[in-house]
Amino acid sequence: MDVSERQPPNRSALPRWVWPLLIIGAWLWFSAGTATLPLMDRDEPRFAEASREMLESGNWLVPHLNGQYRFDKPPLIYWLQAGSLSLFGPSEWAVRWPSACCAALTTVILALWGRRLAGDRAGFLAGLLWATCPQAFVHAHLAVADMAMVFCFTLSCWSGWEWHRGRGHPGAVARWFCIFFGSLALGFLAKGPVAWLAAWPAILMGLGRLDRPSEPPSPLRRPALWVLGGLLTLGLVALWGIPALMATRGEFFKVGIGKHVVERSVGILEGHGLRGVGGYLGSLPFYGLTLMVGFLPWSPWLVRSVWRRRSEGPLPAIDRYLAAGIAAVFVVFTLIRTKLPHYTLPAFPLIALWLGKTLALDGTESARIRRLAIPTAMILGLIAGPVVGRFAQSLPVPRLAQDCRPWIGPTTEIATLGFHEPSIYWYFRPTGGPWVRHLQDESEALEFLARPGSRICVLPEGEAFHRLGSRFPDLRTPAASGFNPANGKRVTLRALVRTGP
């Protein structure tokens, strides 16, 4: 075992109050603004509504959206959001609370891991760098599956390293073994097989590629433990997966893996990528650019630290371990065709840990980081507050739903014509009420509006609205104009509202 693994250098103890301040501050930081911002893109209302329907129906096995199967992601994020809704009631804050908590827990892991590696200053800097990078801040505020998977990914990487360091201590080996394979299972339940990239550094360590042979040998080099752990991971996933596959007759695997993993890897899904060989080759540097932007303002320190490290001799085992995890994420997502900036987010905690550990050795640099963190937090806070808040006020669906709220009761039927955005489900459908209907043409809308009972038809302002309005002059017709983030265009929405029996 290396001396650096037994006794972290530069321990530089910080006051005890720093750690609860970091943890509580991270949670408050990642939660800031989540209660006042409406659900802003297409994914957030899908996750939110599917979680609400899971709670309403009591079906915790297979997620549903508007009464139909939703196979886009495994169930962990829906379980977390449904649990939050049951505790706090339906609100934007409640469905975003699990993401904020997972981001804060990731901060805790980095602080603990960095502290064990290189002392208090390294742990504090690692948590600070993670909490103040834009990628982490943005996705901690979104009601989607990414931050839950990032937490599981980081926990898997940490436990893999501690499992390796537990050589000669059977209790520590058993504890970290269970955490490692358990977190791999939870990561799969959060966002599918991408979470298993976290096992790559431990696999390389077990093959002797990242560390020198030592006495006693690393437990990662015992194949029997890997077989047992793999069975444990698959068994935990199977507790949900087998009943879900049986309930959906295999459709969950066909769509969840076939479409959202395989097709995403070999093709361009939902327009997220460049077509053709030239487009594919031109997109290869994409994640290098998103790293420089998403890790601001710390990316200049990252580039400089990597450059300096080139001339300082062989890397210690922990640096090779972290580099393997970072490379696994960036290489895999660089090679697949579908590209989105947040796909490499699982690598960001490892980057923050390495940089925090590296900068902790230089008191001057760490002091600069701490000073710069304050204006960085202020800028991100302004973006999450007034800037995004002003943008959110331009979203037409929440404002139109608010105008229609007095006429929406438990049995109100909701329909759309020519506007099928999923935010309609969350903002218009009454809790436990009928599913939202998507009308195909004006004849269906005429039939829908002619029936008695409380009902609302949402559609863009235009010829169809005016023709329907002329047929039903007694209906209320509130309006809301604004920006539609789904297609990047402005739209004026109208609601044809029938009240009474």
Image: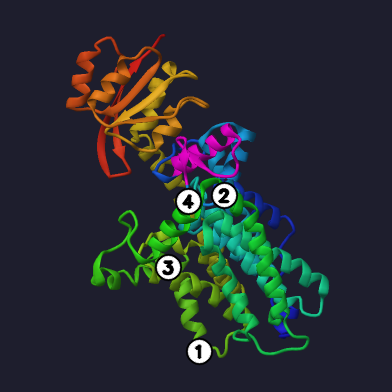
Q: Residue at x 38, y 61 (%)?
A: 263
Is the C terminus in the top left, top right, bottom left or bottom right quadrant? top left
* Disc 4 residue type (three-letter): Glu
Boundaries of the magenta span: 44-70
**Residue at mark 4 to residue at mark 1: CA–CA distance:** 53 Å
First in sequence: mark 1 vs mark 2: 2
Instruction: Point out residue 11 in the picture as x, y percentages from the top left corner.
Output: 71, 73
Label 3 is placed on what type of residue?
Phe
How many dots with numbers?
4
The residue pinned by badge 3 equals 333
> Which of labels 3 and 4 is toward the front?
4
Amino acid type assigned to the residue bearing label 1 in the image: Ser
Pick the residue in front: 121 or 328.
Answer: 328
* Left or right of residue 435, residue 166 in this image: right
Instruction: Please report whichever mark, 3 or 1, sits nearer to the chain's N-terminal start.
Output: 1
Q: Which mark is residue 251?
A: 4
Which residue is the site of mark 1? 311
Residue beneath disc 2: 246
Which is more toward the observer, 437 or 4?
437
The quarter of the displayed image where residue 492 is located: top left
Q: Quadrant of residue 16?
A: bottom right
Label 1 close to label 2 by CB (< 8 Å): no
Sort mark 1 into few (<14), some (14-19) or many (20+) by Cα contacts within 10 Å: few
- Quick one: SS at disc 4? helix
Relative image position of residue 289 (x, y in whole percent): 37, 67
Question: Which is more N-terminal, label 1 or label 4?
Answer: 4
Q: Is residue 242 magenta?
A: no
Eyeballing the image, is 344 above or below 357? above
Say whether residue 176 is left or right of residue 147. right
